[in-house]
Structures are given as structure tokens and as C-alpha cells.
Amino acid sequence: MRIALICLVCLVGVSWAAEKPAVSDEALEAALKDRRYLTRQLKCALGEGPCDPIGRRLKTYAPLVLRGNCPKCSPQEVRQIQQVLSHIQRNYPKEWAKILRQYAGQ
């Protein structure tokens, strides 16, 4: 599970870490409370729905992140990633299991 602690921040905006700074903690909290937004990003990541720019980044970075390789991630981004993953694991267990199956092996 520790390796997985780097993945789904992509879902809420920290995924653009390779190109942009981390989102604010307030923006992250707002995204985590937006069930509709998270569901949309999860569907994109699983290939079950359309993707916006954040979703496309998720699909690009998820395999790397699940292997514990987060290029250019700052300590703040790593902390935020851990926060998001904890939220997803608790609140979206079925989707989390699918994401692990889909991306961990790539």
C-alpha cells in the first residue's frame, strides 16, 4: 500500500506536478469534497468515461506513481498525494481496487 500512496492526487490536480506547482491545501480539500468531480476523474482513469486535462495526466502518470516514482514531486505534493489516496481508499474502495489492477502492473 505504501507504493500506492503516490497515485490519485492526479485526480484532484496535484497530478500536474511535473509542470505546475502543487495545488493549495484548500483547493485540495474542496476537490475531495466534490463527489461528482472525483467520480468523473475516476471514470476517466478507468477508461469508463471522457477525460479532461487532469484525467489525461492521471492516465499518463498513474503507472509511474504506483511504482513509487513521482518525478519532480515536492514534499508538499507527496503529502497531498497521501491525503488523496487515503480519501479514495476509504470512500471509493471498488474504484481504488480497479485502479490498482489497471495501473500497478504497467
Image (tube, rainbow, N blue to C red):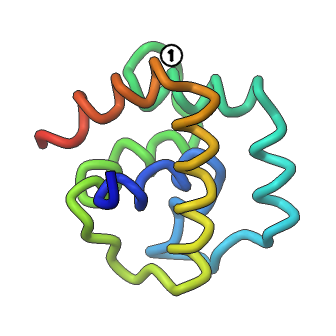
Which sits in the foreground, 97 or 54? Answer: 97
Q: Position of residue 94 (x, y in %)?
A: 45, 18
Q: Is residue 87 left or right of residue 102?
A: right
Q: Quadrant of the C terminus?
A: top left
Q: Position of residue 1 (x, y in %)?
A: 32, 51
- On screen, 84 above or below 17? above
Q: Is residue 87 left or right of residue 29?
A: left
- Which three-letter amino acid code belongs to the residue tagged 1? Gly
Q: Position of residue 93 (x, y in %)?
A: 50, 25
Residue 81 falls in which quadrant of the image?
A: bottom right
Name, please, the residue furthest toward the left.
105
Residue 61 falls in which quadrant of the image?
A: bottom left
Neighbours of disc 1 within 10 Å: few (<14), some (14-19), many (20+): some
What residue is rendered at 52% in x and 37% in y? 89
What residue is rendered at 63% in x and 80% in y? 21
How many marks do you count on the picture? 1
What residue is rendered at 36% in x and 26% in y? 97
Badge 1 element = loop
For mark 1, what is the residue?
Answer: 49
- On screen, 103 above or below 84? above
What residue is rendered at 77% in x and 27% in y? 35
Q: Position of residue 17 (x, y in %)?
A: 51, 72
Residue 99 falls in which quadrant of the image?
A: top left
